[in-house]
Image (cartoon, helix red, strand yellow):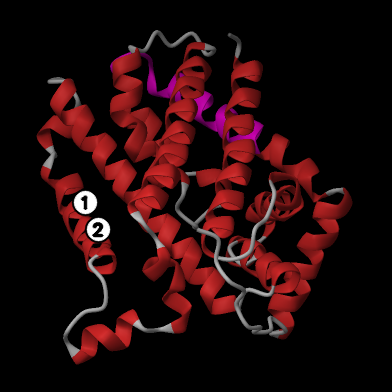
Amino acid sequence: MGLHPACAGSFAVWFLGETLLFSLLFSYFHSRISFREMLPANAAQYFLQLVNQAVAGTALVMFMNRRKGVPFLTAGCTLIFQALLDFQIMAAMALAAAALDSGSIMRRYWYYPLLVLTPLLLNACFWMRGRPASRVGRWFYDRPSMSSFRIALPIHYAKLAGMRAAIFLGYGVMLYFQIRGFRVNVHPGDVFGFLPAVLFCDGLPITPVGLGPVQAILVTGFQAYASRTRLLAMALSISFMNIAFQAPLGLGSAGAFAREVTEAASKGLLREQPARAPIR
């Protein structure tokens, strides 16, 4: 597989996979929303990531508020629920890489993902065990905006984690082909060993599509396979290809919604509405 098909595959894995993931996430805890309904909102979010990282994070929140009546803060906390689950998956993947590959950098630093995973698992246990006995615990547990944390059942965790893990692994496969497309004969095990670090850096809300942190990870992680110059050229090409795929999402209805999000965020017009009954 060449570089361009691999980049297209990577973008498809992320965009289509996350559109399905977010439609399931909000359907479980708020109002039912289809994959087709979620497409323009997620497209607007992807486009805004290129022009305004701060506003991009509010695209799905505003969509659920305006179209489905979910309070702004409640929708934001639902995305935080998924983000915490994402970190659990990345930490678990890092521990798996440490256990399965003796040469992985994760083997030397296995305690870092463990330090991340442990409190996140304790947090999940806090919510699944029911209403706490302490006054402080009850105050936090009963916050209206935390409804998704209260509603979540083990089956919800399993389905959302399975969907996100499939996206991560699909991205890992495409990343391997992207690297090979630059004639870097990297071992697949090393790609998946570094995948949690790449995923973490790619998600940092600092620069569009992780420009900078992702290049640092790829150049550092695979320097045994090629020169730093070739690795940097490869890493930059991957990021710029991602930008090329995301930019057209600003056209059509997604672009109109992106402008609506930007204007509402700048004017503080995001309104709160009563939440609808969740879907079990």
Q: Position of residue 145 (x, y in %)?
A: 47, 79
Q: On residue 67, which mark appears?
A: none
Q: Magenta segment: does it hold 229?
A: yes
Side (left or right) of 210 relative to 189: right
Amino acid type indicated by mark 1: Leu
Identity of the residue furthest to the right in this view: 252
Question: Relative to the observer, which residue lies in front, 279 or 247?
Answer: 279
Q: Position of residue 93 (x, y in %)?
A: 28, 35
Q: Magenta segment: does it hold 192?
A: no
- Asked if the residues shown at circle 2 and circle 1 are in contact, with their CB atoms under 8 angstroms apart, the answer is yes
Quadrant of the rendering where the N terminus is positioned: top right
Residue at the spot 49% in from the left edge and 34% down from the top edge: 167
Q: On residue 117, which mark appears?
A: 1
Amino acid type indicated by mark 2: Leu
Side (left or right) of 5 relative to 138: right
Question: Relative to the observer, which residue lies in front, 15 or 128?
Answer: 128
**Label 1: element kind:** helix
Range drawn in magenta:
223-242
Residue at the spot 44% in from the left edge and 64% down from the top edge: 80
Observer able to see residue 213: no
Q: Which residue is mark 2?
A: 120
Residue 227, relative to residue 137: is it above or below?
above
Side (left or right) of 97 relative to 169: left
Observer able to see residue 4: yes
Residue at the spot 52% in from the left edge and 13% down from the top edge: 182
- The quarter of the picture where residue 65 lies is bottom right
**Main secondary-structure element of the magenta-colored stretch:** helix
Residue at the spot 64% in from the left edge and 84% down from the top edge: 272
Q: Position of residue 250 (x, y in %)?
A: 80, 50
Q: Residues within 10 Å of mark 1 (few under 14, many from 20)?
A: many
How many numbered circles does the render carry?
Answer: 2
Q: Position of residue 258 (x, y in %)?
A: 77, 61
